[in-house]
Amino acid sequence: MKNGNPPGDFSKAPRCGATTRRGTSCKSPAMANGRCRMHGGTNPGAPMGNQYAVKDGLYTREAIEKRKSLRQFLQDCDSLLAGL
């Protein structure tokens, strides 16, 4: 085979199975390490959304609560200033 790849039946390779934008499962074969070359996950149960946002804590429970409390504080300040 080309580039030193082992011969084999392409149709029998394990599939990625990640959910695509269309809502169907990915039909790309998994690489030797078990990961899809396009989706990167080893299984369809991988978290969805922006991976970088999950890593830096943008959508953690604590961050969401902080944003809610800050929003409430700003609304209270606006109502206090409007009463003056």
Image: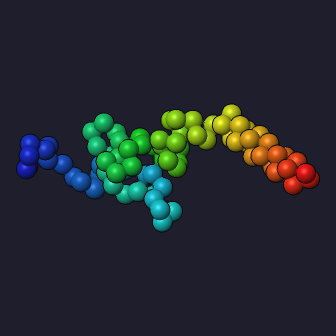
Residue furthest out toward the right: 83
Can residue 59 be spotted in the picture? yes
The residue located at (47%, 41%) in the rendering is 52
Residue 51 relative to residue 35: left or right = right
- Residue 64 or 15: which is nearer the viewer? 64
Residue 38 relative to residue 68: left or right = left
Pinpoint residue 59: horizontal percent, then vertical percent: 61, 41
Pinpoint residue 77: horizontal percent, then vertical percent: 82, 46
Figure disc tally: 0
Pinpoint residue 47: horizontal percent, then vertical percent: 53, 44
| Relative to 8, residue 65 above or below | above
Residue furthest out toward the bottom: 22
The residue located at (34%, 39%) in the rendering is 34
Residue 81 relative to residue 11: left or right = right
Can residue 45 be spotted in the picture? no
Colour scheme shown: rainbow
| Relative to 22, residue 13 above or below | above
The residue located at (48%, 43%) in the rendering is 51
The residue located at (57%, 35%) in the rendering is 57
Pinpoint residue 73: horizontal percent, then vertical percent: 80, 42
